[in-house]
């Protein structure tokens, strides 16, 4: 490099002086990325292996308890009924734990990344089409998983609900401009389909009981939040859910799995259109508040 070029170069500049140095630096960065990717994959595999080992140890412990109880029933005739029942329960639980152990575990950060990309795309779609800031979960056409609810984002501020058949298309372009908007498959649809299959007593059609079922499903079954409490703040068709510790980050983004599951579940249980509004909580009560509102049938 000539003396004049050296003088023109900013003092303290970190830019590579030659093309060879730039290539070498790029190669070094690429190698570091490869190392980080390999380490990330190794950590994922170690995490999955640790979880499987934990399940197997639990299965062995349950089997040991069941076997000891069964042997005790043979040795102690006076307690045989109780011990045999305990032994059978232990062995059955061990078999379930061993053979129902999941082979793959997906970390929360992976799920958050997938949802975040979809949320950004949907938010951009709503913004570029000039749609309203309303989120409605409406009964629509049936799907293979049996959930007919669609997320409808209206185009007009003064809107009306389109017919269920119109929600089969992404762009709802009916002759009535008040019914126009976008209809999306909600992220909470598959979650609700799985949740409904696990209910022993069936899905409630009364708001308070339904809200309790949905809140328990988010925490106990899907672990999408650390705690969820429901409060029917308005007897005329409104339930507010207080969300703490969301697994997938900010709940006030479009069609967040937590809010979507609550909207889909409320709409399906009450068999009517539900408007979902999500906002960050102001106090210590919760991180976010999700309010599901509906119009009572007359």
Image: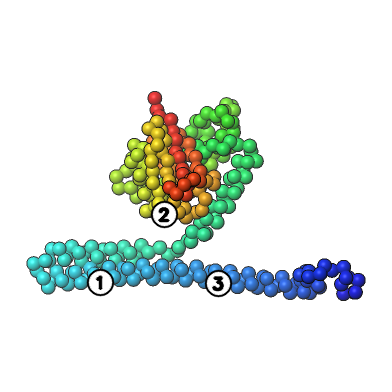
Q: Residue furthest left?
A: 78
Q: For the residue carrying disc 3, how many other residues have a C-alpha within 10 Å: few (<14), some (14-19), or many (20+)?
A: few
**Residue highlighted by disc 2:** 226
- Distance from label 3 to label 1 (Cα)? 37 Å
The correct choice, above or below, for 204 with respect to 7 in the image is above
Name the residue located 25 percent from the left edge and 66 percent from the top edge.
91
Q: For the residue carrying disc 1, how many other residues have a C-alpha within 10 Å: few (<14), some (14-19), or many (20+)?
A: some
**Residue highlighted by disc 1:** 64
Q: Quadrant of the N terminus?
A: bottom right
Q: For the residue carrying disc 2, how many other residues have a C-alpha within 10 Å: few (<14), some (14-19), or many (20+)?
A: few
Q: Nearer the viewer, mark 1 or mark 2?
A: 2
Is residue 91 shown to the viewer in this render?
Answer: yes
Along the polypeptide, which appears first: circle 3 or circle 1?
3
**Residue highlighted by disc 3:** 39
Question: In this rendering, would 275 be left or right of 232?
Answer: right
Name the residue located 44 percent from the left edge and 33 percent from the top edge.
294
Q: Residue furthest top?
A: 298
Question: In this rendering, would 83 be left or right of 121?
Answer: left
Question: In this rendering, would 244 be left or right of 98?
Answer: right
């Amino acid at each position: 490099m000539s003396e004049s070029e050296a003088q023109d170069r900013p003092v303290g500049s970190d830019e590579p002086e030659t093309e060879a140095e730039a290539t070498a630096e790029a190669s070094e960065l690429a190698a570091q990325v490869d190392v980080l990717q390999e380490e990330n994959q190794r950590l994922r595999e170690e995490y999955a292996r640790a979880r499987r080992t934990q399940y197997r140890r639990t299965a062995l412990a349950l089997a040991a308890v069941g076997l000891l109880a069964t042997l005790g029933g043979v040795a102690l005739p006076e307690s045989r009924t109780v011990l045999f029942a305990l032994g059978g329960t232990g062995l059955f639980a061990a078999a379930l734990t061993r053979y129902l152990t999941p082979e793959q575990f997906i970390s929360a950060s992976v799920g958050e990344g997938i949802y975040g990309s979809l949320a950004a795309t949907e938010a951009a779609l709503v913004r570029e089409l000039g749609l309203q800031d309303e989120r409605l979960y409406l009964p629509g056409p049936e799907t293979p998983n049996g959930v007919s609810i669609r997320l409808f984002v209206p185009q007009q501020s003064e809107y009306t609900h389109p017919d269920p058949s119109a929600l089969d298309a992404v762009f709802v372009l009916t002759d009535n401009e008040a019914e126009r908007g976008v209809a999306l498959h909600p992220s909470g649809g598959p979650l609700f389909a799985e949740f409904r299959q696990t209910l022993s007593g069936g899905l409630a059609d009364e708001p308070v009981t339904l809200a309790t079922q949905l809140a328990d499903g988010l925490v106990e079954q899907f672990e999408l939040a650390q705690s969820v409490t429901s409060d029917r703040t308005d007897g005329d068709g409104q339930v507010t859910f207080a969300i703490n510790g969301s697994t997938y980050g900010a709940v006030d983004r479009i069609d967040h799995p937590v809010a979507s599951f609550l909207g889909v579940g409320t709409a399906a249980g009450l068999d009517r259109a539900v408007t979902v509004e999500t906002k960050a909580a102001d106090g210590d009560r919760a991180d976010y508040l999700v309010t599901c509102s509906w119009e009572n049938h007359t």
